[in-house]
Image (cartoon, rainbow, N blue to C red):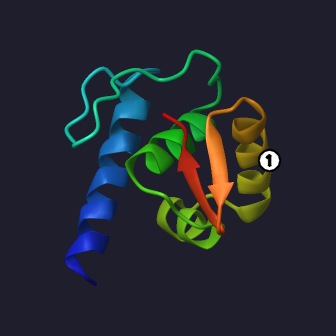
Amino acid sequence: MTAAEVRRLSWVDFIIVELIASDTVTTVQRTTTSSALPTQLDSPRAKLIYLYLESTPASLDDIQSDLGVPKLTLYSVLRTLREQGLVEKQDGQFEAVE
């Protein structure tokens, strides 16, 4: 496993712990400056996927393997996030819109 993969897993673990502890993330230790979730995010999975994509662009396969979310669920959540204007897809990579 590369150092980048270890950092990604650590970030995902941090997100999961924060989502379990509360419905919003108030402090985030990373290089971007976002500190609040968009208000239209209701489901914990949508929050998790949004925060994951906010930290790094990723393919559907990357999201599925890193977060362990079933692909059918990912299709639904990503479609909703794209319809809400929170996520874009370019060249097979999903990315949070800032």
Question: Could you tell whether 61 is left or right of 58 in the image?
Answer: right
Residue lying furthest top in this view?
39
Picture layout, residue 88 above or below residue 97: below
Picture layout, residue 95 above or below residue 68: above
Residue carrying label 1: 76
Residue 82 position within the rendered picture, expressed as x and y whole percent measured from the top left = 72, 40
Residue in the picture at 57% in, 15% down: 39
Question: Could you tell whether 54 is left or right of 97 in the image?
Answer: left
Number of numbered discs:
1
Residue 77's quadrant in the figure? top right
Picture layout, residue 19 above or below residue 68: above
Residue in the picture at 73% in, 63% down: 71
Residue lying furthest bottom in this view?
1
Residue 30 position within the rendered picture, expressed as x and y whole percent measured from the top left = 22, 42
Residue 31 position within the rendered picture, expressed as x and y whole percent measured from the top left = 22, 43
Tag 1: amino acid: Ser
SS category of the residue bearing label 1: helix
